[in-house]
Image: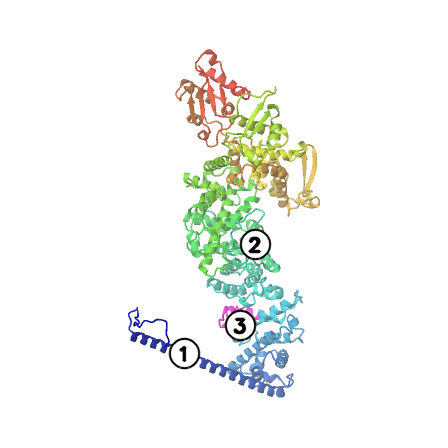
Amino acid sequence: MFFTGDPSTRKRVDLGGRSSKERDRQKLLDDMRLERNRRLWLKQQNSAALRIQKCFRGRKAVELERAKVREQFFPTYGKHCQNVDRLCFGPNSDFLRQLLFFFNPKNAGDFSVLVETCRLLLKFTQNSGDVLSLFAGSDYAANHALIEYRVKRFVLSCIQAVYHARNQLKDQMFMASEQSGASTVILLDAVTILIDPKLPWICKVVGFMQRSTFALLREVVLTVKASMKTKVSTGQVSPLERVFVLLVCHISEKSCTCPSIDLRWSFSSQILTIPLLWRLFPYLKEVFGTPARSQYYIHQMALCVHNHENILPEDTSAEFPAYACLLGNILETAAVTLSQPDCLFDMAIDFAAVTTFLFETLPPIDSASNKSTENLNVDDDEMDVGDESAGASLNKDLENQISTAIDTRFLLQLTNVLFGGISLLNSSFKEAPDDKEVVAVGAACAFLHITFNKLPLEQIVTILAYRTELVPVLWNFMKRCHDNQSWSSLSAQSAYLTADAPGWLLPLAVFCPVYKHMLMLIDNEEFYEQEKPLSLKDIRSLIVILRQALWQLLWVNPPGPTSTIKSVTNIADQKKNSVDFLLHRVSTVASELLSQLQDWNNRREFAPPSDFHADASNEYFISQAVIENTRAHEILKQAPFLVPFTSRVKIFTAQLAAARHRDGTNTVFTRNRFRIRRDHTLEDAFNQLSTLSEDDLRGLIRVTFVNEFGVEEAGIDGGGIFKDFMENITRAAFDVQYGLFKETADHLLYPNPGSGLVHEQHLQYFHFLGTVLAKAMFEGILVDIPFATFFLSKLKQKHNYLNDLPSLDPELYRHLIFLKVHYKGDISELELYFVIVNNEYGEQTEEELLPGGKNLRVTNDNVITFIHLIANHRLNFQIRQQSSHFLRGFQQLIQKDWIAMFNEHELQLLISGSLDGLDVDDLRSNTNYAGGYHHEHYVIEMFWEVLKSFSMDNQMKFLKFVTGCSRGPLLGFKYLEPQFCIQRAAGSASEEALDRLPTSATCMNLLKLPPYRSKEQMSKKLLYAINADAGFDLS
């Protein structure tokens, strides 16, 4: 019709190959379909309009009819029901029929009439004592349908009236029945009369009420609660509380035949989610706490958890989420419920499942969660799985309700019910756990694992460790599962684990922190002699289980990063995220426990050190361990004891070598040269070394010694003189006569608490000595300084506990253990107070262990606290300043991560080397020869025989003579750099040449040995040389 801009007259061709007739036919079909849909939509629209109009006209007609009936009602019965008598409630009267037909709770007149009707109901019932005959007359059976209908409507009308008047009459809600003039009291009293459990219509009425009553009463309670600051207790049960009690009791009865309703409108969903419910209704709390009641409702909630149904109402506020309110209300009644003798095992299982589910959604309470004085915590980047409110905080009263409910009584009762049949099993029981045990352990461990991560940990693990049988019961279970290879049964039956998750995850997540807490507080006698709570044989088995689990978690199948998703809608994903978090948690707590067991093994060996080592740590593992962000590197950080000590030393050596290379210590230029007087070694070293920066400390330091005559000693420092310098410093500074350090009874060194009385600059000297020790380790120089274990703990920034005290003061430890275990009298009679007396160099000072300690007497109740405070004072507090300054100097050169992979015993070996003496055969197999000597030369054969005949002391002096250090390399002489070499010292075997002494070049680890003719001559010359103490003048 219009010009399109295309001048061609070519025929249009459909590239689809269809003719124009086909196109026209398809277009016609599409148009017809659209027209048909349009007609259908118009038809539906008209039908809907008709239905709406019909409904509106019907409602309008009903309203008109209600108004008509209302107009007839008042003249007949009076505005205040003054014309109503007893017969008006009977089945043949129109009174209730008309009232229930026109009643509108929003109408003030209707409300007044209903109140007056309830007042009359209460009056007639009180007079006759029979509500059944009041409504049914003499024949209930003949009219039961009509009567049940009227009672249901009457009760519902009363509830609706209270609901609609809740804002105006909120002050009346908690009045007692004696205050009968209050409208709400009258209405609710009438309801209590009509739902008496003895009445024949009770199931019909309560079943009808459930559909809306709990939701209406929830709003009533929340409105009243919001308007009141505190609940004024009258000591009497209010009608509202009595209504709840009657409903709760009837619904939970086994004989109840009430129809099932949607659980979203149930008592559990609508009422138990009211914040701090039991403050308002203490009597209802008692009723709900009985096992028969709790079991019904908790089982109802457990079914919802298993079916993944969300039945909770909307939160009342961000501070009061529904799930947290439900959890708090359940927990508050749990201790009473679980303590009843008729509390069932199945009920405890359901309880654990429900509370575990609710706890998972709970944000951590009081930032103390996952942290304790023992630093038992997971990494900061490990988020709580499924935590939808991690950024929100709960109301403090609600937090307190939840946290205080998990008390001693509750944990005792829960474990008693769940483990009642298990704890009787003895350790010789060999069969795999049965299904009941598996379910009990799975439920208890899931609940406790979640609780550990949500509530302050220390209080809970203390109760579980000392007031329950959790540790022996769980160990018995784990041992049998391990021996019978039946871990998979726990994965299959636990709702918390996925089917492919290791079954040992849940038991270890609970067992490890509790047993670790016990090990921190028990003493050596309990652990080694009494073998409490586990025998040493069982502990060796536990070490194997922990080692295998850790290696599986950290190397074979390491868990991925924990999920940071705060809302997981898919149930399978949520369970997987929970398991991922559990994997991280177990890897942390298991490594902490195994590390602690290794500490106990170092104090007194009860298991071979190899029991702690994984089998698969090979050269590939070592090569990976020095690379950051690899699995091997993460294992070294988290569980270094899995790797053999020699492998870790190789890694440590490689780290030091890389650091020296990075800092350019291999350069031929030396920036720092020290001139040290032999008779003032320590003072000169302190003055010169203290001025160096960290970069200078990492660089080369060359030393020239000046003898007592002021003459510089011969020799060029190629490293050997510096070694001698380091040994001289440490020998002088760590000598107890110098006053900076003291000795234990075992001649182990620790900082002198009274060092400030001896040296004015004592803290600066401790900083200097920390630097000296670090420099020695940095350069690979071994120094003969035996440190006390509790002081080495400070280099690892660890806290010392009571079981470390024997290494410092065994006598004090014995006295404290006697006080703790063996003293049977009244400790308060000993006149001990929370003070400690320090005696340093004859000067006595008194320090309080607690604020006001001089007035706080030690009693049987607080003696454990007193004992641990004494140990803390002696092991940590007294030497805190000295240790702190020593650590600062030490960390100038040695990073914390480098020594974190060694325990205190191993750290001592890194510092001083092996105490086994000189391995002559190892030295011989790693020796080079020069100047004409070879391994079969008669002088060489003679030399090795002479060296073997030396005493251990002389062998160590020889080693110092040729290498500058009296200790050999920790991994053997294969790692001595450069390798030991014996060079012929004289070109001929003349008498003059043979009269010379052996000499050495310690910087090259070189011995210049003349070709002596006899063993006696060689022995005499060697002994003279190594004992001459002539410095480097012999060179």
Q: CA distance from mark 2 to mark 1?
A: 62 Å
Front residue (pair 667, 601): 667
Residue 857 percent across, percent down from the top left: 68, 45
Against 98, is 664 above or below?
above
Q: Sort mark 3 into few (<14), some (14-19) or many (20+) by Cα contacts within 10 Å.
A: many
Disc marking residue 38 = 1
Observer-side mark, 3 or 1, equals 1
Of callouts 3 and 1, the N-terminal one: 1
Q: Secondary structure at mark 1?
A: helix
Residue 814 percent across, percent down from the top left: 60, 38
Left or right: residue 476 compared with residue 809: left
- Residue 882 in which image quadrant: top right
Front residue (pair 891, 89): 891
Q: From this viewpoint, which residue is outermost toward the top?
A: 991
Q: Which residue is mark 3?
A: 210
Of callouts 2 and 1, the N-terminal one: 1
Which residues are the magenta region? 245-266
Q: Amino acid at mark 3?
A: Gln
